[in-house]
Amino acid sequence: MTDNSTRLDHVVLWVRDPLASADFYEKAVGMRPLRVTDFAAGTAPFPSVRLNDETILDLAPLAGAAHATMLPGAADSAGHPVNHICLALPGDDFDALRTRLEERSVPVSEIHHDSYGARGMARGSFYFRDPDGNIFEVRHYD
């Protein structure tokens, strides 16, 4: 990619079991796992999942929080509340994701209509939690 405009690169989520989380994001949410084999072999500090061509979610082991030293107090970020992460999908993918989550007995909220976001008013959105309690909103604009 040669476009260096400002964009979201990655989000780091503290998770209890990175391999189980990668499996959830792959099978329930439909994201492509990255570095899972390397993490399992001990050669990568965490696995990731690809949201799109430009953005990944890093699945950092909660047990490693004490070693987060990039800033003073960074280890305290484990459990720090983030309200939610919102994913915008095309309408068909929105419906397919909701179906996959329901098939796996992942609780989902009712569908909300006309909520405001980065692209204006979304036609529909719903919420769900990952296995570690992180809240995701999923929306579509078409």
Image (cartoon, rainbow, N blue to C red):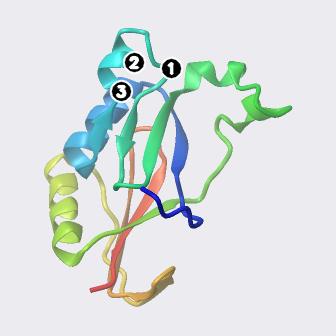
Residue 50 x, y percent position in the rendering: 35, 46
Q: Is residue 114 left or right of residue 140?
A: right
Number of numbered callouts drawn: 3
Sequence-wise first label, 3 or 1: 3
Q: Residues within 10 Å of mark 3 (few under 14, many from 20)?
A: some
Q: Is residue 118 above or below residue 21?
A: below
Please name the amino acid that badge 3 sits on. Arg
Quarter of the image that includes the C terminus = bottom left
Question: In the rendered image of this protein, does residue 11 appear above or below residue 59?
Answer: below
> Distance between the Cα atoms at labels 3 and 1?
9 Å
Tell me the kind of residue under disc 2.
Phe
Q: Residue at x 39, y 18 (%)?
A: 39
Q: Are marks 2 and 1 in contact (CB under 8 Å)?
A: yes
**Which residue is under mark 1?**
45
Left-right relation of 66 to 100: right
Q: Quadrant of residue 138?
A: bottom left
Question: Residue 6, image x and y in percent?
Answer: 59, 65
Q: Residue type at mark 1: give it.
A: Pro
47 or 134, nearer to the observer: 47
Q: Which residue is mark 3?
A: 35
Q: Nearer the viewer, residue 141 or 9?
A: 9
Mark 2 and mark 3 residues within 8 Å of each other at the beta carbon: yes
Toward which corner of the image does residue 44 lie, by quadrant? top left
